[in-house]
Image (tube, rainbow, N blue to C red):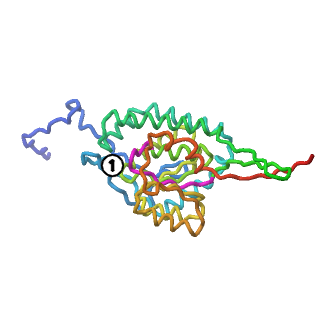
Amino acid sequence: MPRLPESSGTKSAPVSGAAPGSGPALGIDRTAKLYIGGKQTRPDSGYSIPIAAANGDHLGEVPLGNRKDIRDAVEAARKAQAWEQSDGHSRAQILYFIAENLEQRSDEFSSRLQRMTGGTSKSAAKEVHTSIERIFSAAAWADKYEGAVHNPPGRKLTLALQEPMGVIGIICPDDTPLLAFISLVAHAIAAGNRVVTVPSASYPLIATDFYQILETSDVPAGVVNIVTGRPDELSPVLSAHAGVEALWYFGPISGMAATKAESVSNMKRVWTHEGRAFDWYDPRQGQGRELLKQATQVKNVWVPYGE
């Protein structure tokens, strides 16, 4: 009968926080995915980008999105046309649901922001709290941003209707990554648009955490699509895509010229920061009529009348 190998005489120390004899405490390395058509999907390239915390620690990895992923996201957004046809009250209720679910996980998002950006716990909590308020504000506008009635010469009325653009591509900035992301996305979908968004290149994990909120808030598949990657590579693809009606570019200044140039072929409406800094905490810049104006287009309906 063979003998068992003898012990070397050394013992392994128990893992901190684990009871002796219970084995090592294994943490699960969750892999972030793209969010396309209401599903978490792997990137077409098969590659990922490592993301570090402010202190240099490895936080995780996010997919490296490419042209094919953008194409899939736009296709999913176009299939969600029912969102555009829904009434403002229904969209508002879903946005309120998103805000409620984010509030339930506010401590988690604050901790994630603090680790990523290196800010204080107070500043991280403020950004999350303002983000929740921003969703409530967008929801309140969803059924109240209406058109006007004009009285041109010649016995007729002109109804100026505010209609959504359709599919909007959004390139998010690095500063205040959660607040900027939510401010742009919430107002776009409140107006009835569907979005394909490229989150902050430096802090994309805050957006990949957020799609769990979307999954539990009754947001229809395809209304919000998230493709992580390099903005300078993905924004020209969105700008050149004929299925995207508008592009909001708040990414690096280095990619702004290429983004505008690609939009010329299809006459896409492009809104950019033009190299100026945005204060996303300022309600005059980060919420309300300015964002809703960019998210809509005016359709004039002429109504002639008699005596």
Q: Label 1 belongs to which residue?
A: 60
Q: Horizontally, is 201 left or right of 184 in the view?
A: left
Is residue 167 found inside the magenta-colored segment of the image?
yes
Near-viewer residue (108 or 268): 268
Q: Residue at x 41, y 46 (%)?
A: 177
Quarter occupied by residue 72: bottom right
Looking at the image, how many numbered discs can be counted on the residues?
A: 1
In the image as oriented, which residue stretches furthest toward the right? 307
Residue 54: x and y in percent read 28, 46
Q: Quadrant of the N terminus?
A: top left
Residue 40: x and y in percent read 48, 49
In the image as oriented, which residue stretches furthest toward the left? 9
Near-viewer residue (90 or 177): 177
User: What kind of residue is marked 1?
Assistant: Gly
Residue 253: x and y in percent read 41, 59
Span colored in magenta:
165-179
Q: Residues within 10 Å of mark 1 (few under 14, many from 20)?
A: some
Is residue 36 found inside the magenta-colored segment of the image?
no
Near-viewer residue (55 or 26): 55
Instruction: Decide: is 125 above or below 37.
Output: above
SS class, disc 1: strand
Q: Horizontally, is 54 left or right of 131 in the view?
A: left
